[in-house]
Amino acid sequence: MATLLQSRLVKYKCSCDEWSALSDLFYCKHCRALKCRGCSSNEIDMLFCPSCLENSSVTEARLKKYRCMSCNECPKCGRLLAVRTANEKFYLVCIGCRWTTRETDTPDQQASSQWPMQENPYEEEIQNVIEKMRGLANIEKAQRDQRDLKKRPMNSGYRLTDKFGLQQMYERRRKTFEKATVDVPVHEPVDPTPFSLDFLSAKPRPTLDQIMRQPLAGDQPPKPVHVALKSRKSIRCSCQHTLVKLEYGPSTIKYKLNMFARNFIPEVRLSRTPNLKAGNENWVMISLTNHTSCKLDLTLTPESGEGLMNCSTGEIALNLPFAEDSSDLLGTEKRSDNEAVVFRQRHRVGIRLDVSQVAEDAPPLGLMMNLRLDDSFIQTPLTKNEETKPSDEPQWLAIPVRLTLQDS
Amino acid sequence: MDLPVVTYEKEEYVETASGNKICKKNTIASNTIFGTQNIIISGKTIIQKDVILRGDLAVIRIGRYCIVQRGTIIRPSLKQFVRKPTMFPVTIGDSVFVEEECVINAAYIGSFVHVGARSVLGRACTIKECCRVLPDSVVSADAVFPPFSTIGGNPARIVGQEPECTENLMVEATTMYYDNFVPSNLPKASFA
Amino acid sequence: MSSNLPSSREPKESRDPKPSRRSTSNLSNFSVTSTAGFSSIDNIKSPVVIELGARTTKIGLAGDSSPRSIFRTEFVDENSVKFTSVQLLSPRSSRLDPNGYNALVKFIKNIFDVLGTMPKDRRVIVLENVLTETSFRVKLSQIILEVLQCPSIWFVTSHLCATFPFNTANALVVDIGSAETIILPVSEGVTLLSCVHVSSSVSSLYLEVRCDQLMRAHGQRESPEGVRSALRDEDWRIIRESNVLETIVVSHCFCTTRERALAHKKPGAKKPEPEAEEVVLKFDGLTLIVPPYVREMTCEILFDQELTMEMGDDCALPNLLHDLSRKLPIDLKRQMFSNILVTGGSAMFPGFNSRLKEELQAMADQQKLKTADDVKFYQFDDINSQLYLSWLGASMIGSLQDVVQNRSLTRESFLNGGRPQDWLDNFSTRPYQAELFGEKSR
């Protein structure tokens, strides 16, 4: 898990120059680059209710005002309401705060779904005003078009049908004809509601959270709030190719397409909590794990620069087999290991880096990973007409990595 | 960070044929696991010290590569139906990591879920796959949480979204934990 | 009233390329509509309306009669770092404050997530108050147009939008917010920007400060046995963490009459009868007693000039309104007081409007003015409309496609160096010239 393995300590540089942990990165085969959530775009895959896990399409959702018709939340505390039956009718109960729909003026309903929602009493009035505004907007548009029409040349391609320019004159006159606007009265200002001794009572008014949850309730007893729909996303690279797409169904965890970066790039992890003291020679143990399904060829170069830890270990060339690789069981491959490699276990290597620091707080440790791209990294062109890259020339992907050694 | 090697006293744990490692010597009571005939553990699961499994109430099903840390209570809950109250079985999926001192009355915990320390999962709640429950959170009864949600607070709400590769991460973490959970008197030359 | 929309002072944003029409003749079926498919977007999808308040954010689609969602302007990122509204809405540039900038980007992405819609498809309408810093506007435009790739953005004045639901062209809009109060008169659809008045002491921030002060002086705790005593330091920690002061102010305080307030203030005078009831609140193990004095007198900070000057060094509400009416032209003074429009979440107290009327009339009597003879308020009863009135107005005007299209700043023009225009940029110095788009000046 991200927190179990503390993968947030290690950050990789994405193609958009942002640093993210490996679990938040994706790899695009077409662009041959890492993409993070910031540089890739999200798309709404489907809308679903978080409690009944029922999905709905965008048009359905719009009709239902983006709320689930069967699930309700308590207006007081926000928990999901449970349905109880009494005399073949249903009422809703909140388990947390003991609020029930019986406290409101709505009677028990015949059906447990489609509970009546809070309506806005001024809805009609507001729609009338919008109509009036629409009328004004049309007038404005007519005036503007008339002005534009003046600028246009008179004889623009209608010589055949519009010999004497009569049609155009008629049209221009027609446009200046002002449409009658709907006359909607002003909502008149009134005298304020006077002070009443009811204000003195200790009966609590809704809290800000309750008002925000159901603003239309006002001073009346609140009604159950329909649960808002949540959206599920699929991720698409800037080159328009999809990177991550889940299967159909709101409660699935299977992917149709999953170009996670960890399926292509080895994972660097801190192996042990480093014991760092200023001035002394310390070492940092990191482990490199190959989660991909093929052998990886890479070189790891510690970077020492500004703001980075001073590392004296040189460049390390590695050949990481994948998890199910059975080739070295035969012992045929002899690896000339670098002295920095202290441990090797199937698809993992442990590396010791010698660092030294001057100041008290440890700056991050910088590494440059150079990965050789073989065929599984590249999207092979479908047609032969596209320029084929010569396969003998290896392609390399350079990925800077930063490890936070000390929790600041 | 790689998970460290955790050792245990060989005498305190029972290792079954399917690879389950269950602690038999507890500090709070002599026996903390009740109704063992109702408890089905699929394999390669670790049940640590002082974990109470109330199999005497209803069936408890735990998947593979699960880790239940010490002090946790897994207790099937009661569901009041119209005619008669029934005990809801607890189903826990694969690669679930339950931290210390949690109280689980949930009806269903999906696979690849990470439950934080001291959290309380209320009666008959449903946590779908690949979720993460933050430490010290209290999930209300009958709550349902969709996959990939980060759940936290009291009452628990969805506070974030989990990364898409959670399944892979949890599989790796739980297998690594299982591999590194070794008896103390066995010499093991391991570095990681 | 002129046939133009009350859009005066709305800055003329860089316009979309106009639909090039050769003729509207019925014989012609040859009309090349605008480029970039905006009309196809407009036909289907209504714009997203966002109001970023200092305490609450209201979001929804244009055309709705109430916001889809109202939530606090706060953000917690994946590392559990909390960002307050001050940090999110700060005008500091992204270079100086990269964390705050990233948090704001994620906050706005979250808005689109809650609405279940893609930023690429939706025009955005953002409500702002007239005193928003330009750097914040540019920052917001950059996030919405460049980072999220929305097609266009339109900044609307929140005070003007508040008048739309009432279908009125004349109103004295008083927006009592969380950080400050801004008063702006609107006459015949023209915002009288020269008369804008601001006070930072009349705000929910200061309401909570006052409540804190009064609770420290009069609040009590009750032990499980029923013994009452003063509040202790650890109680104040619980009060801070559970946001108790906000609960007390929103749910239990009210605006009392002028008579009662004066009676309370006079030292040694008889307390007014009947007394308000005390309130017992239970939080996290602490039983808090809110005495009636606190309930009644917290709101005095809105009306009492001495108190506001002492606490916040700024005017109280009635003084502010009378100052403003002095600056108004003579024909508008009485009219404005009969057309007061109170908006803003901090004005949702019972008894607020009637107390404001009493105070205005008392002050007018003192100064021998006749302007406050007839004080009337625009109000929608019973729907907590003050919290989202401006949002509602923006939603109404946002449902008019042509209006939005013509006044928005498009993505293309922003990327080519265009900037959202400020209300000062379109100052016309010829007072009687009415431009086609209804831009009048005062």
Image (spheres, coloured by chain):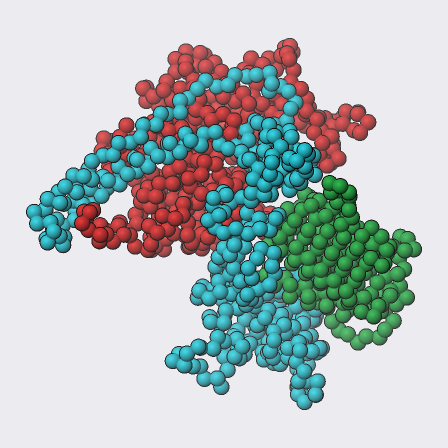
Chain colours: A cyan, B green, C red
Residue B55 in the figure: left or right of residue A26? right
Residue shown at 41%/13% (left/top)? C373
Looking at this view, name the residue that lies furthest to the top: C270
Residue B126 in the figure: left or right of residue A134? right
Where residue B37 appears, as percent x and y from the top left, is 85, 59
Q: Quadrant of the N terminus of chain A?
A: bottom right
Looking at this view, name the residue that lies furthest to the right: B30
Looking at this view, name the residue that lies furthest to the front: A88
Q: Nearer the viewer, residue C96 or C283?
A: C283
Residue shown at 55%/31% (left/top)? A217
Where residue C208 appears, as percent x and y from the top left, is 59, 31
Residue shown at 86%/55% (left/top)? B35
Q: Is residue A93 above or below residue A41?
A: above
Residue shown at 63%/62% (left/top)? B166
Q: Is residue C243 visible?
A: no
Q: Is residue A140 visible?
A: yes
Q: Nearer the viewer, residue C380 or A262?
A: C380
Where residue A100 appears, as percent x and y from the top left, is 66, 33
